[in-house]
Image (spheres, rainbow, N blue to C red):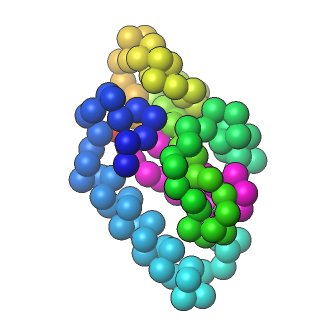
Amino acid sequence: MGGAFSKSGQVGELASIDYLLAKKALLRQFKAGQIAKNDLCDAHPDLIRAAKSIGAPAGEICEVCGKGDIVHISYAFGPKLPPYGRCIAGSDELDRLRTTVSEFTCYVVEVCPQCHWNHLVRQF
Ligand SMILES: [Zn+2]
């Protein structure tokens, strides 16, 4: 994978495999016509905005629309953070967050700015 924060290292690899399997299952159902595109491509407008401004290119083409460049966005959630989470713009910000907030969970989401497909990539 090698996302924006791969240098931090301690990603839960088992968890990310789960998300990958869930994603593959979703895409399989989509390709078999069992899921509507609208049900997959339901990214919140804020997420799309974040994807366009701070998203880290994943180097993958969206499997849903076949056109969009997938970007990864990271969000931090924790007791001392806003309830809707905090968008992390880069690894510098992640480091800063680590020193100021002791407890938080970071979610990495992949987003297609073209068709609004979004899926959880990993959590750490
Ligand atoms: Zn797409």
Q: Quadrant of residue 43?
A: bottom right
Q: Is residue 108 magenta?
A: yes
Residue 94: x and y in percent read 45, 22
Tell me the residue at 52%/49% (across/down).
Answer: 59
Eyeballing the image, is 103 above or below 37?
above
Q: Position of residue 19 (x, y in %)?
A: 38, 59
Q: In terms of image quadrants, where is residue 53?
A: top right
Relative side of 107 to 6, left or right: right
Q: Is residue 64 magenta?
A: no
Q: Quadrant of residue 32?
A: bottom right
- Prevailing secondary structure of the magenta residues: strand
Question: Residue 60 versus residue 91: which sits nearer the camera?
Answer: 60
Residue at (62%, 53%) from the top-left corner? 69
The percent position of residue 12, horizontal first and vertical second, equals 27, 44
**Which residue is nearer to you in this view: 58 or 72?**
58
Identity of the residue drawn at 36% across and 24% down: 103
Q: Position of residue 47 (x, y in %)?
A: 67, 44
Looking at the image, is 33 positioned above or below residue 38? Answer: below
State ligand 1's quadrant: bottom right
The residue sitting at 43% across, 40% down in the picture is 3
Magenta residues (range):
107-122
Residue 68 as seen in the image, left or right of residue 29: right
Q: Quadrant of the C terminus?
A: top left
